Amino acid sequence: MRGFMLMLLLAAGAFGQTADQATRALSQRGELDEIRWADPTKGAAFLVGITRALPEGLEVQRGAVKRVLPFDQIGGVKFGLTMGERQLISEAKVESIPALRVFWEARQLTVQVAGSNAGDFGLALARALRQTKAYAEAQAIAKKIAYEDNDNTRRSRALAETETLAFIQVMETAKPEEVERRAWAVTEIAEESNADLMLLVTGFLMQKEFAALKLVETENPRWMEDDEMKPIRERHYHRALDLALYPSLFHPRRAAEAAEGLWQAAQIYLHTQETARAVAVLEDLLALYADSVHTSKARELLTPLKASLESGKPVAAAKPDDKPKDTEPMGPPPPPKRYNLFED
């Protein structure tokens, strides 16, 4: 019973998202962590609570007794993870920054120790800081993990984070043409292991292509009859759509980006007056990402769009009253469709 209550306390400390609660959780860990001796003759691995890493070694606790184990005596560690701690590192929310910083600062000196999970807290902190535009601090943390972490996979993830942060800084400081050139270079490499960077550049390029599409049509109102401008317009059109649909096709679990992409695809279809395709995309958005920030707007748009299709009138003229009186009320959206990026 005591152990169960301790686990609840630790989970609550991490869920609380405050620095004080995270500090308290670390100080009341119990014997959740494992330490292996560098010299096997000193004995088997043993359980303690690792409260923090100091320059001279690990501060460990058993009951009310604390001591510091020098790093040269430690062969490896295994940090236990409470449910709350797992959520902290998996979600990397902005509101979790204070708690994440406490864990990172308490463990960052162990990044080179075999088995340390300090890098997981550091990466979560870097991702959360990126959302607040604290790029310099996030970059410093990611670089430390990329160059010093004991785990190859985590080093690769940290390196990807440094690349993402570097591109964001390019977007803020470089000339627009340079940003666009680098963005296309990223898509050509198609480094799918760095989903953050791919989603960032495809979203950026989609906006550029959509803007270019509208500019071509504005400056060339008879583009359909222009053998020189028509292929240029078509290229911008297809690129904009491909880039908008990229998140839902290749990273469907990234709900925010995928929903945003489907919403943007619908805007492209609305601009080109392809009502049936706009309806299909909006229905997919509702079916796949019902909690999206675009949900209410998508539902609001579908009513006049469907009325337009049924009445044959333009969307601006079509109203719900235009629908036949015996039409069934709109039910749930149909199952999502599969898109083909190479389809005209």
Image (spheres, helix red, strand yellow):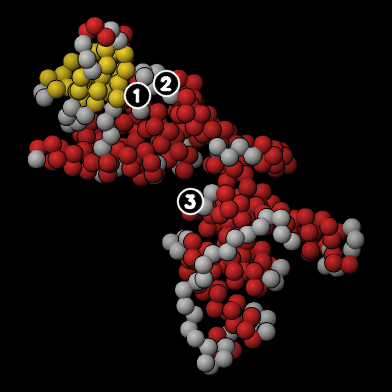
Q: Badge 3 is on which residue?
A: 253
Left/right placement of residue 309 relative to residue 162 reads right
How far is disc 2 from disc 3 in space, using C-alphas?
Answer: 29 Å
Indicate whether 247 appears above or below 129. Answer: below
Circles 2 and 1, Cβ within 8 Å, touching? The answer is yes
Quarter containing the C terminus: bottom right
Callout 3 secondary element: loop
- The label on residue 250 is none
Give the residue drawn at x 85%, y 67%: 224
Pick whichever, 1 or 318, lies toward us.
1
Give the residue drawn at x 54%, y 64%: 336
- The label on residue 150 is 2
Which mark sits nearer the N-terminus, 2 or 1? 1
Quarter containing the N terminus: top left
Q: Amino acid at mark 3?
A: Arg
Callout 1 secondary element: loop
Left/right placement of residue 46 relative to residue 323 reads left
Q: Amino acid at mark 1?
A: Ser
Give the residue drawn at x 61%, y 51%: 246
Callout 2 secondary element: loop
Give the residue drawn at x 39%, y 32%: 120
How far is disc 2 from disc 1 in space, using C-alphas?
Answer: 7 Å
Which mark sits nearer the N-terminus, 3 or 1? 1
Circles 3 and 1, Cβ within 8 Å, touching? The answer is no
Measured as percent of width and height from the top left, residue 186 is found at 65, 38
Q: Badge 1 is on which residue?
A: 116
